[in-house]
Amino acid sequence: MKYRKIPDETIRRMPMYLRALSLVEQEGQQTISSRQLAERLHLKPPQIRKDLSYFGAFGTRGIGYPVVSTAQQIRTILRLDVPQKAALIGAGQLGTAIAAYPGFSVFGFDIAAVFDNDPAKIGKHIGRRVIEHIDAVDSLEDRAIRLAILAIPSEAAQACADRLVRAGVKGILNLAPCYLVVPKRVKVVSIDMAMALGVLPYYM
Amino acid sequence: MKYRKIPDETIRRMPMYLRALSLVEQEGQQTISSRQLAERLHLKPPQIRKDLSYFGAFGTRGIGYPVVSTAQQIRTILRLDVPQKAALIGAGQLGTAIAAYPGFSVFGFDIAAVFDNDPAKIGKHIGRRVIEHIDAVDSLEDRAIRLAILAIPSEAAQACADRLVRAGVKGILNLAPCYLVVPKRVKVVSIDMAMALGVLPYYM
DNA sequence: TAGTGTTTGTGCTCACATTCACAAATCCAA
DNA sequence: TTGGATTTGTGAATGTGAGCACAAACACTA
């Protein structure tokens, strides 16, 4: 395929493929066809083939995709081949839940630091990590932490994002229900639970 | 505008508009133009005008949209004009965080029941609510609860979704990282935090 | 080595969503 | 009452992504 811009939607699906392939690997299956993978993920086979083909030809015609090496390729594409450290901002209820969430490890994420602005929480433990004062985010650059998960109220989110950007953070997962203004070099992905819930009654 | 199918993307944005309008209302502003609204939400003005126009002509040319009545119209469209009761399934860390999350109230959601399968948790309180045994979900229909938030591990999610559907649930917000198979009449919206985080390193 | 069955990789078409551009509608001031 | 300044509502154009259909490639058997 001659060079084409890789659709954002394709990138968004790559972690899906990686997780599915990890599961298939655990089950001991050596290869998987686009049809089988599509069944698991409730997608259409051509979608998966096209997505993967943007990054090269991983599959073998007549056989399918080799599970282990394709998973590894996707890890390389997504830069998940090296363990990624992330900072968690906000040690409230949501922050605590995220710190304990087991789902991040499949992708090699490690929540390496936790910050909060509540003096009463500083020094306490959250899992195996010590809660640090929010002012300590300036040290993130030295600690090679480039990712942050924002689990704080909307009112504080933008100011905090500004600090994170100054501290060299390159990617932010924002859980506050607000839009964050950041330089173009920084990527923000937002999750808004209330908005997601908000559309449900419409469809009932 | 003659009848046209309303795009899913338009529906997805309606709660955004509603939240923004609620804020503008609090600030005491009477009307708002598509340009002002677009600035707040980082969208383009024609997008907002087209989205709103699918449901009728709410605005006044030369002036803009009346804040209060447009918000009320959106509530009616989304069926958020009546308070919506939701059941929370899973009283773990994530479930506890969701039960305490203040963001749902803007849309009139009320978490009216909490369920778990851990006998040790049954009867304990989570906020003002008592944790009930998961078997009690069958009573949801009688209690007029048609929405559910799934905050349980993936392994249990499908079986639980099946029970919810049997109990008359019409909409599910799924926080487990898996696809749920449900009848077409039931709407599922999934949030996968690990997947959202998974794309960030790619853009760094 | 030839034939059969399977599955990938991809050009093309279609559907959907976003954005533009402009007429129609309204306000306000003189 | 008229003219200028705004802003909506929407047909048309543009952009983006999904899915089809088929040729190319490979495995396996005889």
Image: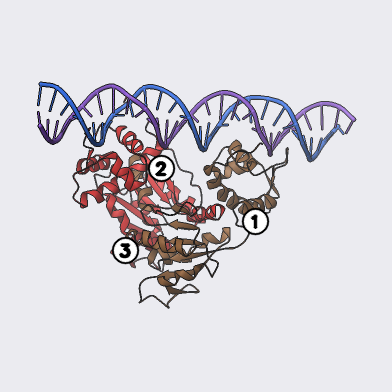
Chain colours: A red, B brown, C blue, D purple
Quick one: label 3, few (<14), some, or many (20+) residues within 10 Å? some
- Report the Cα–Cα distance between label 3 and label 1: 39 Å
Q: Position of residue A73 (x, y in %)?
A: 24, 39
Q: Position of residue B113 (x, y in %)?
A: 49, 69
- Image quadrant in which you'd find residue A13: top left
- Report the Cα–Cα distance between label 2 and label 1: 31 Å
Q: Residue at x 35, y 52 (%)?
A: B194
Tell me if A177 is positioned left or right of A94 in this view.
Answer: right
Is B82 above or below relative to C10?
Answer: below
Residue ID for mark 1: B26
Report the chain holding disc 3.
A
Q: Secondary structure at mark 2?
A: strand
Is D13 above or below relative to B163?
Answer: above
Q: Secondary structure at mark 3?
A: strand
The extreme bottom residue here reads B123
Are discs 3 and 1 located on one and the same chain? no
Report the chain holding disc 2.
A
Q: Is residue A15 visible?
A: no
Quick one: label 1, few (<14), some, or many (20+) residues within 10 Å? few
Is B79 above or below relative to D9?
Answer: below
- Report the Cα–Cα distance between label 3 and label 2: 27 Å
- Tag 3: amino acid: Val
Are discs 2 and 1 located on one and the same chain? no
Q: Residue at x 26, y 43 (%)?
A: A75
Q: Identify which residue, A196 or A119, lies in the foreground.
A: A196
Report the chain holding disc 1.
B
* Res. A130 mark: 3
Q: Position of residue A177 (x, y in %)?
A: 50, 53
Quadrant (top left/top right/bottom left/bottom right) for the C terminus of chain A: bottom right
Q: Is residue A9 visible?
A: yes
Residue ID for mark 2: A187
